[in-house]
Image (cartoon, rainbow, N blue to C red):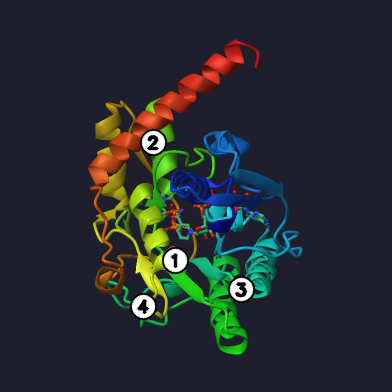
């Protein structure tokens, strides 16, 4: 297969790219390095079947035809990152998705959108099934991303109805693992980074809000199954239903790292969802998919990667690289 992955230099995009290359596919990664990094593609660049195009998806993709699949992941994903330039975030999710869909339409390729549990907003239904239409504050600080992903879903379904594009929409719940950027503000990488430095681990609010964390290899497996299934589907939730409060997550990470860090509390950001857990019945029934890695196992691998990355950076600094 000849496959395009937008957002390939990011956390999820780089793991997806590695998996597709290992399966023998030709992959072209597209990324403008807004929140991604070239070093995430070190493994990919060893394959002659990989190429990289530095490009902003807000502009039409300069890729021609001859593609079988387009995975569209390009978008900042961490709240501090997508709120840094909210107008641009909305632009990326509308125009970027439009351009990626145009590429799929012209090439006759199958298209997969990396959507999000954020389309459910601060959910009033728990756990969240795909049929739930959500509770998004369209004028709040998260709306640039939440509404951006909602219009991206709308565009995808309209390209299907109007142009016959074969689309897949994955609603991804919080995913974590190696290669998360420790500076991007997401909770798992922030907690691990601060615990390993012996700094206070900052829990927002009282820490009773919950999330459900999926390990990256499970998530990538779900994306690939969704892309390759022949079933015609609506959106599909992908995530791990193992739910945990942020206070318990902080304590777990402090314990696992053997850190002397303390938990500190800071103000809860506006519109921070109170609870989140995917109903993954559809993914189980249609894709035969479910998570296989328990939270503690995944955290242990993520902590090991973080330690290795930090040591590698220190060694490079010492070597003057
Ligand atoms: P990430 O920030 O690590 O990766 C996003 C990638 O997209 C980065 O490499 C970034 O440089 C690139 N990008 C951003 N804007 C771009 C633009 N205009 N043109 C080209 N490239 C651009 O985030 P991630 O966690 O890997 O998320 C990937 C996708 O999955 C995103 O669409 C995100 O919304 C979605 N998602 C992720 C999660 C999660 O928990 N990781 C949850 C729900 C949805
Ligand atoms: N969070 C926290 N401390 C941090 C970063 C995040 O307590 O340093 C909380 C945040 O308020 C939210 C949860 O952790 O309730 C998950 O935050 P993240 O930004 O990772 O993802 P999202 O809110 O998009 O699920």
Residue under the image location 38 percent in, 49 percent down: 216
Q: Give 73 or 51, whichever is nearer the viewer.
A: 51
**How far across and down, in percent of the image, does residue 199 sit?**
41, 30
Provide the residue designation for mark 4. 130
Q: Nearer the viewer, mark 4 or mark 1?
A: 1
Tag 2 or tag 4, which sits nearer the N-term? Answer: 4
Q: Give 51 or 89, whichever is nearer the viewer.
A: 51
Mark carried by residue 192: 2
Tag 3 or tag 2, which sits nearer the N-term? Answer: 3
**How far across and down, in percent of the image, does residue 264 sit?**
37, 40
Provide the residue designation for mark 1. 227
Q: In this view, does 114 lie to the left or right of 51?
A: left
248, above or below 38, in the image? below
Q: Distance between the residues labelled 4 and 2?
A: 31 Å
Residues at circles 4 and 3 in contact by the CB criterion of under 8 Å? no
Tag 3 or tag 4, which sits nearer the N-term? Answer: 3
Q: Does the residue labelled 1 lie within 8 Å of ligand 1?
A: no
Q: Which of marks 3 and 1 is in front?
A: 3
User: Residue 84 occupies which quadrant of the picture?
Assistant: bottom right
Mark carried by residue 37: none
């Amino acid at each position: 297969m000849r496959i395009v992955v937008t957002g390939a230099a990011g956390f999820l995009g780089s793991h997806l790219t590695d998996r597709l290359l290992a399966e023998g596919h030709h992959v072209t990664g597209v990324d403008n390095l807004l929140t991604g990094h070239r070093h995430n593609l070190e493994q990919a660049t060893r394959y002659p079947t990989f190429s990289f195009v530095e490009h902003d998806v807000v502009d039409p993709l300069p890729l021609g035809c001859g593609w079988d699949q387009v995975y569209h992941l390009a978008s900042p994903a961490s709240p501090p990152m997508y709120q840094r330039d909210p107008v641009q975030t909305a632009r990326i999710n509308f125009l970027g998705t439009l351009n990626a869909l145009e590429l799929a339409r012209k090439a006759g390729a199958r298209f997969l959108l990396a959507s999000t549990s954020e389309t459910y907003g601060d959910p009033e239904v728990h756990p969240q099934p795909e049929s739930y239409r959500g509770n998004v504050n369209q004028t709040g600080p998260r709306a640039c991303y939440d509404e951006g992903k909602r219009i991206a879903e709308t565009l995808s379904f309209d390209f299907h109805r109007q142009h016959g594009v074969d689309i897949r929409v994955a609603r991804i719940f919080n995913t974590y693992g190696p290669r998360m950027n420790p500076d991007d503000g997401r909770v798992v990488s922030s907690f691990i980074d601060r615990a390993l430095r012996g700094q206070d681990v900052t829990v927002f609010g009282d820490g009773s809000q919950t999330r459900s964390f999926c390990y990256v290899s499970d998530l990538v497996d779900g994306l690939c199954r969704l892309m390759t299934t022949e079933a015609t589907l609506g959106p599909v939730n992908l995530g791990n239903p193992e739910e945990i409060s942020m206070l318990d997550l902080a304590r777990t990470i402090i314990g696992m790292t053997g850190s002397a860090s303390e938990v500190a509390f800071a103000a809860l950001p506006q519109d921070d969802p109170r609870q989140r857990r995917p109903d993954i019945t559809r993914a189980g029934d249609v894709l035969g998919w479910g998570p296989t890695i328990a939270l503690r196992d995944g955290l242990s691998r993520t902590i090991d990667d973080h330690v290795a990355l930090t040591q590698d950076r220190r060694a490079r600094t010492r070597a003057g690289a």
